[in-house]
Image: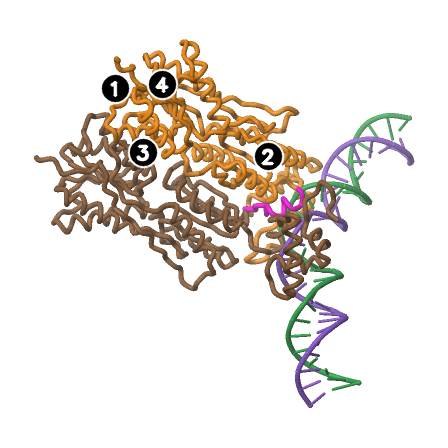
Chain colours: A brown, B orange, C purple, D green
DNA sequence: ATAGAGTACGAAAGCGCTTTCGTAAGCGCT
DNA sequence: AGCGCTTACGAAAGCGCTTTCGTACTCTAT
């Protein structure tokens, strides 16, 4: 009989159902070796009593851990919080819990967080955010993840693809191309790029797309200002100031993510430079506030919540032999921050 | 000796240090009954080997669970993601893990998430977001939390104060007063309020502050339009449209949070109504993008990350007998979205 | 020297579950 | 009737830790 004031245990359910502990466990886990009749009875009793398994005991005993570890650069960056939102949604449906860890955009720290999550025995690991150029760190992360998978862990990454695991990746290059084409189509030729943290693969990919679009028009990135700072609003401000100072005749600024674009816009406003009349601005990601900026931001939409959902869904499905890759759609969303290049 | 390819266990550390399992446990937990010398040796070995305790085993054995459950309305709302960011920061310092659950602004669901977290044996529960007027739900949540605390759980809430537990609360009423005073000082008299979800205590408190400020000038909220929708950008849009339709002569709109203010601004922009020349707009919270909107938003700053940090710190400290309450500062940040009331 | 108190440590129980192993019952076959 | 095989279940081990209890040892007071 359930002890008063105590947590409901599996034995309590088993007793009520008139079966042994082992049978009850099997029945609730859906494992075979239990007759349909008995299994139904156990499930019924469990539901009636409102039984919830103790995840600690379950995991300790060797069952799969039901918690998902999600590593993001920084949760208060909308790009990541929107991804997290999708992950949490699926997790709630599946009865999983989501643990969030910050990597703070630092490869070393990301590795540390990863190891910590593994040590903490999470069952599924999701890593969101760009990969790094740093081969050593990526290599260590890769082997750490491989070991984790060998031990039965599930892994998926979001927005990167260099770790030898299942990945949900936007086509950053195609997005970059779309932006380049859009601006070129509007007559822009003196285009500057506010690029994010150097060393991030995302930066390289998006940049490559822009370069590809330019080369179609006989232009090259080499001749254009590409200012690296980092993927934040302040980074955007820094980049914008440098661009305005060294290349005041630019007619368009491509920010490699929306956070930077917001920073760029704020500098332009402060300087009284009208957007898009004198300067066009493009972002990347389409975080939800992008549509509500003034001027509203032209950007490449990535379905962040959907990416989060896909990643967890992917990780949940039995692993195939080779890493799977799920591309995500992307759409150039043209809003008010871009317009025809001003006449000379 | 550590088995190859296996997780490092406490016994491994104990053996290497030449002590028993019990002593090793005590040493690492900082419990007494171990000589300084032995304790140092154990800690030393533990560090060398890179030992991380298995949290499942630890919790199962009766130790305090090292995971923090954080319930937010919606993680992709900047207000909450900024709070979460603060919580995660402290958690990382303390070696705790943070589990995030969505309540989706629904009292019933919040209760469900709460129960789930408790069933999942988290050690600390943090609930962020407004309380609800619904007495039944609040009562159930309160008794659930009380039971959780009796069982040794730690609890703190952020931005609400009706659950009989430690709370980190902004002075919403004073914030409302500051807004009211600011607008009145600018000469506004026909002020409309875009209020959030009815039934949230936050809405009532902020509204009360505004009312208090008005009454000092012989005005009353009764005579003014207060439009309820919900605490989102879309909610702000709906409210703004209704205000413009029914009270086109308003000269200022108070949005009870920044998300709504962003929605309000987007409608005003779409209608070509200049801010602040024809209409002033105020928000509440000062989410980080507020400063970068155009026009930049006048709002009441709440230190969200700090609130998250305080809440976890509070929960971590030994409980006092009575619920503690930590007020958070708030500052009226005057930016470009408010200006003198237009002449009649 | 000896009793009593205190200190430092080890042995072992137990947290709630999963899983392995053992066994009884039921089946078809010779 | 006797054999092996399968199926449905229970007993018990064990996951890695914390904590209780017991014991050897040291110290102080008589």
Of all chains, the one bearing label 1 is B
Which of the two marks, 4 or 3, is nearer to us in this view?
4
Tag 4: Cα neighbours inside 10 Å, few (<14), some, or many (≥20)?
many
Of all chains, the one bearing label 3 is A
Circles 3 and 2: CB atoms closer than 8 Å: no
Tag 3: Cα neighbours inside 10 Å, few (<14), some, or many (≥20)?
many
Q: Residue at x 57, y 42 (%)?
A: B117
Q: Are marks 1 and 2 on the same chain?
A: yes
Residue A140 in sight from this viewpoint: no
In the rendered structure, the answer to whether residue B169 lies left or right of residue B214 reads right
Q: Residue at x 66, y 25 (%)?
A: B321
Of all chains, the one bearing label 2 is B
Which of the two marks, 3 or 2, is nearer to us in this view?
2
Mark-to-mark CA distance, 4 and 2 = 36 Å
| B154 or B64: nearer the viewer | B154
Tell whether position B60 is magenta.
Answer: yes
Residue C5 picture location, percent across and down: 83, 31
Residue tagged by mark 2? Answer: B141
For label 4, the SS is strand
Residue A117 picture location, percent across and down: 50, 47
Residue B191's mark?
4
Tag 1: Cα neighbours inside 10 Å, few (<14), some, or many (≥20)?
some
Residue tagged by mark 3? Answer: A233
Q: Are marks 3 and 2 on the same chain?
A: no
Q: Are marks 1 and 3 on the same chain?
A: no
Residue B140 picture location, percent across and down: 61, 35
Q: Which residues are magenta?
A: B50-62
Quadrant of residue B175 within the rendered picture: top left
Residue tagged by mark 1? Answer: B277
């Amino acid at each position: 009989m359930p002890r008063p004031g105590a947590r409901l245990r599996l034995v309590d359910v088993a007793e009520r159902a008139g079966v042994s502990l082992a049978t009850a466990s099997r029945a609730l886990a859906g494992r075979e070796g239990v007759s349909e009749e008995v299994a139904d009875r156990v499930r019924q009793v469990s539901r009636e009593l409102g039984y919830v398994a103790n995840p600690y005991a379950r995991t300790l005993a060797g069952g799969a851990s039901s918690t998902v570890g999600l590593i993001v650069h920084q949760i208060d960056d909308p790009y990541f919080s929107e991804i997290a939102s999708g992950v949490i949604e699926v997790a709630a449906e599946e009865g999983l819990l989501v643990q969030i860890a910050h990597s703070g955009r630092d490869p070393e720290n990301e590795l540390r967080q990863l190891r910590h999550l593994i040590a903490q025995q999470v069952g599924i690991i999701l890593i969101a955010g760009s990969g790094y150029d740093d081969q050593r760190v990526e290599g260590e992360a890769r082997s750490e993840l491989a070991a984790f998978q060998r031990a039965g862990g599930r892994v998926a990454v979001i927005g990167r693809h260099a770790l030898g695991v299942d990945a949900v990746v936007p086509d950053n290059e195609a997005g970059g191309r779309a932006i380049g084409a859009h601006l070129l189509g509007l007559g822009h030729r003196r285009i500057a790029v506010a690029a994010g943290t150097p060393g991030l693969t995302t930066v390289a990919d998006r940049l490559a797309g822009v370069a590809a679009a330019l080369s179609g028009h006989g232009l090259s990135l080499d001749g254009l200002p590409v200012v690296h700072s980092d993927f934040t609003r302040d980074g955007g401000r820094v980049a914008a100031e440098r661009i305005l100072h060294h290349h005041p005749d630019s007619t368009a600024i491509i920010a490699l993510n929306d956070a930077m674009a917001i920073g760029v816009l704020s500098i332009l406003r402060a300087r009284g430079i009208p957007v898009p009349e004198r300067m066009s601005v493009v972002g990347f990601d389409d975080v939800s506030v992008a549509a509500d900026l003034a001027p509203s931001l032209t950007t490449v939409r990535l379905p962040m919540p959907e990416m989060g959902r896909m990643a967890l869904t992917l990780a949940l499905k039995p692993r195939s032999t080779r890493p799977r890759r799920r591309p995500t759609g992307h759409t150039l969303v043209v809003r008010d921050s871009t317009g025809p290049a001003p006449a000379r």
